[in-house]
Amino acid sequence: MATPTVPPDYALDARAVAHGFEIAPARFDSAAVLHREVARRMAERLDLVTLKPARLLDLGCGSGADLQPLRARYPDALMLGLDRSAALLAHAASRTPRWRRWLPGVLGGSQTAVVRADIAALPVAPRSQDMVWSNMALHWLPDLPAALREIQRTLKVGGLFMFSMLGPDTLRELRAALDEAGLPGRAHRFIDMHDVGDMLVEAGFAEPVMDMEHITLTFPSPEGLYRDLADTGSLAALAGRPRGLLTPRARARLDAALMRRAEDGRLPATMEIIYGHAWRGEPKQTEDGRAIIKFERGGRR
């Protein structure tokens, strides 16, 4: 089977992605309504999981909004939140009482720490985590297959990876309006659910389960949509995007194309949400590439 890769026209500029989140924190929490709703729906899926993690890693934790409900669900877990944005992590740290961050075991509590790092190069020991949680972060990674291999590396055998991310129908109204306005190449494209499943298998995960749904947000005007995207760090970050701001005339064409898609005076913005979970299975080869063959003792005949 060919190794899954991210198509060239999906490629992201890592610096542009990072910049979007560094300037977003002041309004991120109030704007991230979709993130909170998706986190709630992910948590419902955890009701079916009997695993009680001793160590849990929240990848792309952002401002740390998921750390509190995860702490409530798993009060004894050692919990680590990781994100690339220093500005968002400052908010995440402020959510956690200082004694919980630095004094594990005090009054029956466990440690919660936040760390700045790249998901594609995790500062986490191999096979050290029982669960990895990632809400609405994976679609921002320039090299998703590499990141999935890193995540698999950090999980213990039998550990769970649960995630959500955006799928290809996301912002279809905006993409269509950009094309209509003669402004192609400015909106992101997102990886299909089935391709993500193939990447999980290739990365060494077992039993991946994938599903998706559409959630539609509405805005009173194009300006409301643009502001929401900026406030959640969702700026244009395609590697091959046109550089420079839109001219007033181009902006007017885009606004008009968007409003032609309005329904009852409100502009819809479709979001395709992919949900997935998979387990770290028994390794099939050693770190140097040699196959692992297990022999079981048979009974006497």
Image: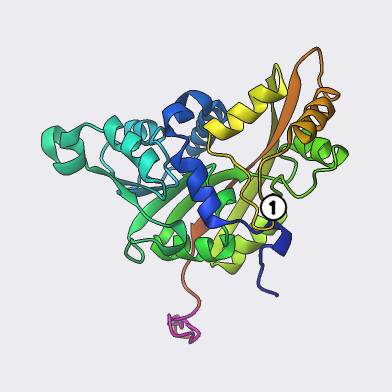
- Relative horizontal placement of residue 97, taking residue 29 as reference (left or right): left
Picture quadrant where residue 124 is located: bottom left
Which residue sits at x=86%, y=24%?
Answer: 260
Q: Position of residue 90 (x, y in %)?
A: 32, 38
Q: Nearer the viewer, residue 109 or 102?
A: 102
- Relative horizontal placement of residue 231, taking residue 287 as reference (left or right): right
Q: Position of residue 282 (x, y in %)?
A: 46, 69
Picture quadrant where residue 145 is located: bottom right
How many numbered discs, if any? 1
Label 1 packing within 10 angstroms: few (<14), some (14-19), many (20+): some
Above or below, 288 against 174 in this view is below
Q: Mark 1: which amino acid?
A: Arg
Is residue 7 visible from the viewing direction of this image?
no
Above or below, 174 against 244 in this view is above
Membership of 127 in magenta stretch: no
Q: Position of residue 41 (x, y in %)?
A: 55, 31
Is residue 209 visible from the viewing direction of this image?
yes
- The span picked out in magenta is 285-297
Q: Position of residue 113 (x, y in %)?
A: 27, 45
Which residue sits at x=35%, y=66%?
Answer: 126
Please identify the dominant SS of the magenta region.
loop
Residue corresponding to mark 1: 241
**What element does badge 1 sit on?**
loop
Which residue sits at x=39%, y=39%?
Answer: 88
Which residue sits at x=47%, y=30%?
Answer: 28
Colour theme: rainbow
